[in-house]
Image (cartoon, helix red, strand yellow):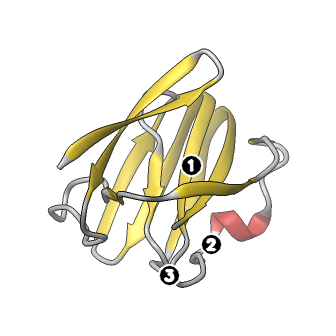
């Protein structure tokens, strides 16, 4: 398993990268497979502008991974399969595997966006 440094403006985040799209141990953040490229980026959302759909279970399309990138504040991220919850912050982005149900919960002031990745 390698470490992928994702560069965004003046911030560099550490995200685990593996050669397999399998999930990490049950308590760990999923790992990104190698060879992914960003093809789309959402707008920046805040606690006041977050779309309602992100607050309930939803998933990405088959083959599409995503990163929840926190610009400021914290955001709770829950993955349903297997069930685990993370408090995301600027130095800890959320890795979203393809089709896995997940949701976010606002816990205070936050600014974030989502980057969509595919081979």
Residue ID for mark 2 = 56
- For label 3, the crowd category at 10 Å Cα-Cα, with few meaning under 14, some 14 to 19 and many 20 or more, is some
The one of 86 and 3 positioned closer to us in this rendering: 3
Q: Residue at x 65, y 21 (%)?
A: 9
**Residue drawn at (44%, 61%), measured in percent from left and top?**
78
Residue 13 placement (x, y as % from top left): 44, 29
Element class at badge 2 = loop
Label 2–label 1 contact, CB within 8 A? no
Q: From the image, tell me which residue sits under label 1.
A: 68
For this view, does 51 lie left or right of residue 64?
right
Spatial separation of the CA atoms under disc 3 and disc 2: 14 Å
Helix, strand or loop at label 1? It is strand
Q: Nearer the viewer, residue 11 or 39?
A: 39
First-in-chain label (3 vs 2): 2
Rendered image quadrant of residue 2: top left
Residue 102 image point, x, y percent: 50, 70
Above or below: residue 68 compared with residue 69: below
Q: Quadrant of residue 27?
A: bottom left
- Which residue is painted at 15% across and 62% down in the image? 25
In this rendering, the answer to whether 100 lies above or below 66 is below
Identify the residue under disc 3.
99
Q: Mark 1 or mark 2, which is nearer the start of the sequence? A: 2
Badge 2 density bin: few <14, some 14–19, many ≥20, Cα 10 Å = some
Q: Distance between the residues labelled 2 and 1?
A: 15 Å
């Amino acid at each position: 398993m390698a470490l992928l440094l994702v560069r965004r403006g003046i911030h560099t985040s550490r995200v685990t990268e593996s050669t397999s799209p399998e999930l990490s141990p049950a308590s760990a953040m999923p790992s990104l497979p190698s060879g992914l490229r960003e093809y789309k980026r959402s707008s920046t959302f805040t606690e006041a502008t977050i779309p309602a759909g992100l607050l309930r279970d939803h998933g990405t399309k088959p083959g599409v991974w995503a990163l929840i990138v926190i610009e400021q504040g914290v955001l709770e991220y829950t993955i349903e399969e297997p069930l685990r919850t993370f408090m995301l912050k600027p130095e800890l982005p959320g890795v979203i595997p393809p089709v896995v149900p997940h949701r976010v919960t606002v816990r205070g002031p936050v600014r974030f966006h989502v980057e969509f990745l595919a081979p």
